[in-house]
Amino acid sequence: MSKASNDKTPNDGLANSIHTPGNSTIDQTMSAPQSPTTNHAPTSEEQAILVHLALADMNRSVLSQNGTNHSTTLLPQFTPPLNGGFPKVHMSHSTQIFDHLDNRVLLTWFQVEQPKFMDRVFDHSRRDIAERATIIVEHVHANITTIAESTHHDALPVHVFPPQPQGGKGAKNFPIGFLVHRVSNETKNLLLNQCIWSMTDLTFEALPFNCTHPPELLFGSTGFTTLDIVTILQAISETWTQDNNRYCIEEFFSKCSLPDDELIYKATQDFITSCHVKLLDFKITGGLLVPHFNILTTSPTNDAKTWTDLRSYLSTLNYPTSLDGYRTVTALFTCQICHSLTHPQGLCLFPLVPHWNGLKVGNRNNNNTPHQIGRARGSRPGQNI
Ligand SMILES: [Zn+2]
């Protein structure tokens, strides 16, 4: 009976449904009663049946339209997206994806037409990426092409450009972002929305080709003798709200085009209340506990200089607690799996993601608690910041 179609839109689905009273497009069947009267007024029960059937038609139509862009349906080779989103990758500034990139290459990339986006590959050190750029380009190209084909909007072959370090082969620091272009907007949006794509031969993060909002990560702290994040948060809040420190924070926000004192006061208040603390349960050789905290906030401004100056100022302050010591400066980590600056490789959360295709970390507890004895290979604090 049903003539469910693929080209029906949600808007006309209910009105044009074959189950809607008065619709004359119902197919006649051999066993159908002859000449049902068109003047029949359905009872309330019959009306309810018709409405439910019409909604079912509409839902089938919507599902069929959305299904063409549903990555988990058509691209089972990739790790499926998490309901709550993948773990966040924390960077040190808004354009870190372009760090250490040759200036001439960056200027050329500026002139590459949209749609374009950046691709940061996982599971490689920066040097690995420089030395294996050609192979990685092939993997990126193959995977993006697979995704592009699923959207049916891409006619041109995908182009992938490797990064080149400032200073050439002898450079000390290496860029990690690849430029991808010649994709449709549909493909680009699909990639950016899911953000993390993990296959057995490549895992990457798709990033927009622009300045992102200032990162949440402010600095790392150690030296406290407690694991209680509430105590640490209290020490930070009390320090920032001291009159002289609060005045300095307001001074920073007054330089970023906030129009009046009221908004500067509100920005300062929002900034302080947005602070949150994350504990890294970190042990050194011998099992000694060394609590390490990451301090994160939400910047109320996109002004890069304001945020950089403010972060420098706040990272030099003392944060004493009553009984649990005070903060000492510590460098950030670099995770070689996801490149986040908030943890060493051994504490990376990505290998715990269900059906994760990327690099696995072997020395974990079985209860899924990020935990590490000793420091992971190649993850000394302060690398490549
Ligand atoms: Zn990581």
Image (spheres, helix red, strand yellow):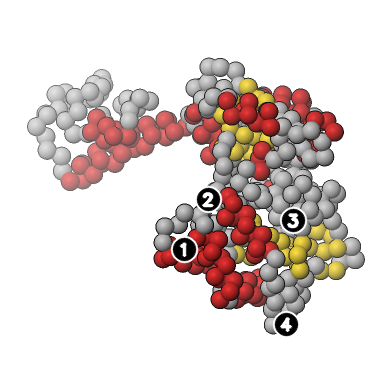
Disc 3 on helix, strand or loop? Answer: loop
| Sequence order check, earlier mark of 1 and 2 | 1
Structural distance between the alpha carbons of marks 1 and 4: 34 Å
Structural distance between the alpha carbons of marks 3 and 1: 30 Å
For marks 4 and 2, give the one nearer the viewer: 2
| Sequence order check, earlier mark of 1 and 4 | 1
User: Does residue 249 sit above or below 336 in this rendering?
Assistant: below
Q: Badges 3 and 4: C-beta atoms under 8 Å apart?
A: no
Structural distance between the alpha carbons of marks 3 and 2: 22 Å
Q: What residue is pinned by disc 1?
A: 264
Q: Kindly tell me whether residue 293 is visible in this rendering.
A: no
Disc 4 on helix, strand or loop? Answer: loop
Q: Residues within 10 Å of mark 1 (few under 14, many from 20)?
A: many
Q: What residue is pinned by disc 4?
A: 323
CB of residue at label 2: within 8 Å of ligand 1?
Answer: no
| Sequence order check, earlier mark of 3 and 2 | 2
Q: Which mark is residue 302?
A: 2
